Image: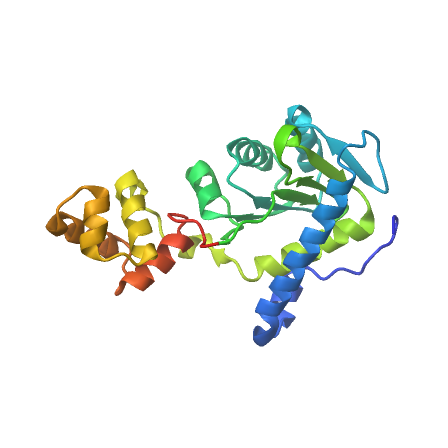
Amino acid sequence: MAGTLFDLPTVGDLEESLPQGHAARLEQTLLQARALIESTMSLHRRRPATVSGVTHTDAEVTTETLERLILRARRSVNVALTGSVAFVETVLRCVAEVPSGVTVRVLCTPAALEVSPARLRGLAGVRILPHELSGFVVADGTSAFLRLATQGPADGRAAVVTDRAAVSTLQLLYAGVWSRGRRLVDHPEVSPRLRSELTRRILEQLRSGRTDATAAVELQVSLRTYRRHVAEIMRELNASSRFQAGVRAVELGLLPKAA
């Protein structure tokens, strides 16, 4: 598979040619493709040397690896940010230093947005995705950095991918998901009030379907106080129903998606 080249469509080409009815199906297919690539690399994550265009790296050299990958880009840098503070901050610092002629696109979750909202809102090409993607960077469509989802002592490991077929698949994955992302300018800024611990607990009560009386007892507040908080939260979320409030809470990263 190494060395295989694909005539890959650009993000713009895909957005213009993609039939609306097939967008959701394509996104699911691409997410499955990403999972396949990640699981394949995970099988080799303990090998120290390059295997089939995949080099593994430990957390302590991640910053140096990202700097080398992003700052050497000459055409494009496509980024998927997760809520990992270190990863988000390192990537955004490097992105700020790329030459002006390099096209930069950033997909991020609401949680990642909150790590550095000022920096992200200062970038032109940023979109929000409500569900989590593994963090990765694709530079010039020829090399990629992918954080590996591992558990235990190996947490924080990553892979640098130079296999052209694998990188092209990641690039195609990115293009499809980008086309479904919400533009950052359309993503409302969340007030500090909605970030409070009390608000989170109330939103959890609403999602669980508990009655107001039961929820008030659980939170150790009066029924009147609980209902007042609910009304204020719905107003902040511009929601006309409690169900809609729950949906918007997930979209804004105030609640995780239900399992």
Most foreground residue, 20 or 154 = 154
Q: Does residue 20 lie above or below 203 as drawn?
A: below
* Residue at the image position 34 percent from the left and 56 percent from the top: 207
The x and y percentages for residue 246 are: 34, 57
The x and y percentages for residue 169 are: 74, 55
* Residue at the image position 27 percent from the left and 64 percent from the top: 241
Residue 17: quarter of image: bottom right
* Residue at the image position 29 percent from the left and 55 percent from the top: 206
State the count of labels: 0
Q: Does residue 34 lie above or below 120 as drawn?
A: below
The x and y percentages for residue 134 are: 61, 45
Residue 156 seen in render = no
* Residue at the image position 16 percent from the left and 53 percent from the top: 227
On screen, residue 176 versus residue 202, left or right, reads: right
On screen, residue 1 versus residue 257, left or right, reads: right
Q: How is the image coloured?
A: rainbow
Q: Does residue 149 lie above or below 5 as drawn?
A: above
The x and y percentages for residue 253 are: 41, 48
On screen, residue 54 versus residue 256, left or right, reads: right
On screen, residue 204 versus residue 74, left or right, reads: left
Residue 43 seen in render = yes
